[in-house]
Amino acid sequence: MTVFKKIPRLQNSWVLLFLLWGHSLNATTKAPVFLIDPGHGGDDCGARSVIKARGGEVCEKDLALEIATRVHKILRKKYDAYLTRSIDRNISLDERAQMADKVAADYFVSIHLNSHEKPHAKGLEVYFLDNHDNIAVHKIERVENKDQKGEIVVINQILADLVIERTAPISRLMAKYVHQGIVSHVKKPFGYTDRGPKAALFYVLALSKRPSILIEAGFISHPEERELLVREKFQEKFAEGIVEGLEKFLEKRPKE
């Protein structure tokens, strides 16, 4: 009788151990979750330029969405992938960050385009969140962080310091391989200029609270680069480069 009473407890223990083992296995083998973030949107055009031959203005928000949508389409064939926006709509930095939490994203990839008052400026850049003293990068930060003011800036700077300590090494590695992937797809085929991976303090990356990168796909203020950026073939190759880099990063990242 005593033995009979102990058997259910033993069985329950094995069931519990099995469930815990299964949960642990799923946690280590689950597909990574990517959140792809097309910059700007809605009444926020971002950088802008005019293509006379196409009869109108080109907005950063639209080209960022084109590239991000292509990245998302490729990624979701093998991984869990989401977009912060799939249409032209306003979305704040806080909302982007909240979405990263909602979908339990492992990695955050924000896509933007650059602009400069000097029309000869050109090239792609891949940024990761970290502190630095690069004066040229500070100019880009001011553009991308322009909606943050007053106490919010102080709070975000404190948050950034905390996030940097935890995520910078992985974000740097992700930036390295994504940069390599993009270069391999667009530098030689299109004669595209490469400005390299760099550290920067972008609040959208800090607020995401996870390993993250921000890609400046090129300068829409540069006439030749702008013509490439609006071409579907170029957008597709650029997106393929991002995905190739992300997959290489997944191979090389430290295993937990």
Image (cartoon, rainbow, N blue to C red):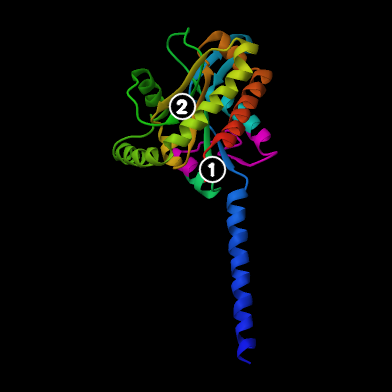
User: Along the horizontal axis of the image, is 89 left or right of 145?
Assistant: right
> Where does the N terminus fall, quadrant-wise?
bottom right
Counting from the top left corner in percent of width and height, residue 3 is at 62, 87
Provide the secondary structure element on which disc 2 rests.
strand
Tell which of 15 and 110 is nearer to you.
Answer: 15
Counting from the top left corner in percent of width and height, residue 205 is at 44, 36
Tell which of 218 and 27 is nearer to you.
Answer: 27
User: Along the horizontal axis of the image, is 180 left or right of 143?
Assistant: right
Q: Residue furthest top?
A: 120
Q: Is residue 256 above or below residue 176?
A: below
Q: Is residue 230 visible?
A: no
- Picture disc at residue 127: 2
**Count of numbered labels shown in the rendering:** 2
Q: Which residue is mark 1?
A: 255
| In magenta segment, residue 79 | yes
Alpha carbon of mark 1 to alpha carbon of mark 2: how far?
A: 23 Å
Q: Is residue 253 above or below residue 216?
A: below
Which residues are drawn in magenta?
Answer: 72-97
